[in-house]
Image: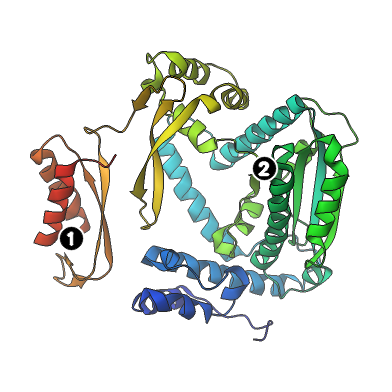
Amino acid sequence: MDRGYISPYSDDFIDQMVVKIMSLPKGERSAEIENIEFSKRIFDFPLKHALVHSERQIRSILVRISGVAHDLRFKSESSKNIYSTDLVSSKNKDEHKLSVNRRENYRARYGGYSNKSYYEIKESKYWCDAYVLNILACDAGFKCALITITAQKEYHDSNLFSTAEIVKILNGVFKNFTSKLRRNFRDSAFGFKVIQFHKSGTPHLHSAIFYDPGYEKDIRKLLGSSLKNEPIGYHQFKPSSDEYDKDNNKIISYLSHDISNEDCEAALSKFNGCSSRSFQVFGKCLKTTLFDNLTKKLKFLHGKGGVFEEIYDLLASGELSSKKKYTFLKKFASKILPIERNVVSRSGMPRTEVIGLKCVVTSQQILWAKDDESCDFHYHRQNEVEDSTTNQKIENVTVNVSLTSVGRSSYSAVLTNRFPRLNLVLPASVHNCLSEAHARGPPR
């Protein structure tokens, strides 16, 4: 393949390819995607069947490949202007803004009365988690160092490499290092990594690593051996020359630059071919999902006594989120276990959902997903749903139905209120499935 050739991935091209790929058996879809230009730069083939199950997943994959094409074309054009410092093409940036707007709308609907923007929330999360890691390291008497890994010189000089391709390489070599770090040192080293960009738009990787001073030589040696013969440029392990404390760490301040920058975020979005978080923790579980979940379920903790009441008092206090999270990890995380159930996401992928807590000491439980609350029934069939406006069969349709278990009348109301808006007519077989699911009640 000529690396200089830029393929014109239009929206029409994506629409046609979605139809073509969805018509194939699942076992043949990965091979068809592999034949598309630039796909091998960002995906490892063969793709698992679960990743090419729905139309939404196929479209997401094609949009990422399209983002690589637009990125390469943009770099080819902007390289003529040596003063250009843009990181991402205008098309990818526009697509990313639409994505951010959708997240903003979602946050506005479910985020209460907070006026914070998506980028302000993202920056707050960075400082919260970075602070928690920093204070845990201080408690353990660990040192802090800055790791830097850059791309090879040819990636800087050439416009034939996409952002996605370079980020994939940087993440891959760093993951190789952190995997060995966990095996060899376990709780004696942890930290976080960020992806940043040079003025030319070429990505590089930084990491703040906290470690037991007694293992400094071994960690340096491990980093060197892990990156040896890898396709990278410069790498450095630089211990902090300044003493740091719980409220002051210059490395964390330095790595906060661009953490909520729109251009950087767009360059790392799936529209530009990348699927990478600009901030990612390694070597330590901060139980972020559980912590965020509990902050939204305070009413279920209140009045339950014991450890649940203590958690409520902590989360309902006026302390900073970072201090709440630190106290939660140190004092309560080992005393509770989340109660989970298996659910299916809108894209058809299985996932777990936290529906309650169990105290390890007393075995007391609390649940916030009860029988009188709604749950999702996921239905997927071929050639069984009809569009009431055209009377045509719709293939591969996915229907998410909200069920309640307070009686048949509520079940009927759900159907009559929701489905006419979608112009769908459900066949008798689907109604039977829904009736059976309703009789069983929400899954536990």
Residue position for label 1? 424
* Corner quadrant of residue 149: bottom right
Q: Residue furthest right?
A: 241
* Corner quadrant of residue 286: top right
Q: Is residue 243 left or right of residue 184?
A: right
Which residue corresponds to the image point at 47% horizontal and 67% vertical from the top-left?
48
Residue 367 x, y percent position in the rendering: 33, 28
Which residue corresponds to the image point at 62% horizontal and 27% vertical from the top-left?
322
Give the mark nearest the N terminus, 1 or 2.
2
Which residue corresponds to the image point at 45% horizontal and 39% vertical from the top-left?
107
Circle 2: residue type = Gly
Q: Is residue 7 left or right of residue 429?
A: right
Whole-number angstrom distance, CA of label 1 to CA of label 2: 48 Å
Give the number of the disc on residue 260.
none
Is residue 150 at least partly visible in the picture?
A: no
* Corner quadrant of residue 443: top left
Q: Is residue 108 above or below residue 267?
A: above
Residue 256 x, y percent position in the rendering: 72, 41
- Mark 1: secondary structure: strand
Circle 1: residue type = Leu
Residue 285 x, y percent position in the rendering: 60, 38
* The C terminus sits in image quarter: top left
* The N terminus sits in image quarter: bottom right
Q: Is residue 234 above or below residue 184?
A: below
Is residue 268 at least partly visible in the picture?
A: yes
Residue position for label 2? 283
Which residue corresponds to the image point at 59% horizontal and 42% vertical from the top-left?
119
Residue 394 x, y percent position in the rendering: 22, 69
Q: Is residue 136 above or below residue 396?
A: above
Closer-to-camera residue (332/259) = 332
Crowd rating for badge 2 (residues with CA inside 10 Å; few <14, some 14–19, many 20+): many
